[in-house]
Image (tube, rainbow, N blue to C red):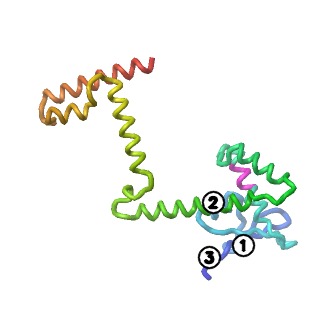
């Protein structure tokens, strides 16, 4: 088993300082958070008692980020977590959260795998629906600004030639009219 496969062992001394056993130096909570972001598993133990303190320190990292405004957990989720601790029966919340995060990681892995292909966006699930929705939105918006058909349809109907000065001046006038209508909407 390589060093990267084993959890990084961090020992907490009586002074509450955290000691990285791999590099033989002291680390901070932010250092530990960085190791985790890089994909390392971390195990934090109390040097004197041998107690596993990993959960306690991971919760502290989350609390520190949340208190700095890095809000990842919505208030209703935090409330549900607190409620799960007050129920008499065994809570399903831990299993639900673990399953949800497993599904999220699998989805991310699948997405990243699709990005490595020749035409990655063609295989992203739901992209065609998003593109169709955007196209319909822009078409509706362009028809709302003018009683005529959208600019792209007008150009195709005229067999648009980008070298024609007449066509360029018509495009400029259409853009000016569109800008005026946008300015009216802002007021």
Residue picked out by circle 2: 101
Q: Earlier in the sequence, mark 3 or mark 2?
A: 3
**Image quadrant of residue 91?**
bottom right
In the image, is residue 133 above or below residue 40?
Answer: above
Residue ID at (71%, 53%): 62
Residue 73 in the image: x percent, y percent? 68, 48
- SS class of the residue under badge 1? strand
Q: Given this view, does label 2 or label 1 mark the residue nearer the observer?
A: 2
Q: What is the span of residues highlighted in magenta in the rendered image?
A: 60-65
Q: Name the disc covering residue 5, or none.
A: 3
Q: Which residue is mark 1?
A: 9
Q: CA distance from mark 3 to mark 1?
A: 12 Å
Q: CA distance from mark 3 to mark 2?
A: 20 Å
User: Of callouts 2 and 1, which one flags the residue occurring earlier in the amino acid sequence?
Assistant: 1
Q: Is residue 18 magenta?
A: no
Q: Residue at x 45, y 65 (%)?
A: 113
């Amino acid at each position: 088993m390589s060093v990267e496969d084993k959890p990084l062992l961090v020992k907490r001394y009586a002074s509450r300082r955290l000691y990285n056993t791999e590099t033989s130096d002291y680390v901070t909570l932010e250092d530990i958070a960085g190791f985790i972001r890089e994909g390392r598993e971390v195990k934090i133990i109390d040097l004197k008692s041998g107690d596993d303190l990993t959960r306690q320190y991971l919760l502290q990292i989350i609390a520190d980020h949340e208190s700095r405004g890095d809000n990842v957990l919505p208030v209703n989720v935090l409330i549900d977590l607190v409620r799960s601790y007050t129920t008499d029966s065994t809570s399903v919340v831990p299993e639900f959260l673990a399953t949800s995060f497993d599904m999220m990681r699998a989805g991310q892995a699948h997405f990243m795998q699709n990005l490595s292909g020749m035409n990655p966006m063609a295989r992203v699930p739901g992209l065609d629906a998003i593109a169709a929705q955007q196209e319909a939105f822009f078409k509706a918006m362009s028809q709302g600004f003018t009683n005529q058909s959208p600019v792209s349809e007008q150009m195709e109907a005229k067999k648009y030639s980008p070298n024609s000065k007449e066509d360029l001046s018509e495009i400029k006038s259409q853009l000016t009219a569109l800008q005026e209508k946008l300015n009216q909407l802002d007021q």
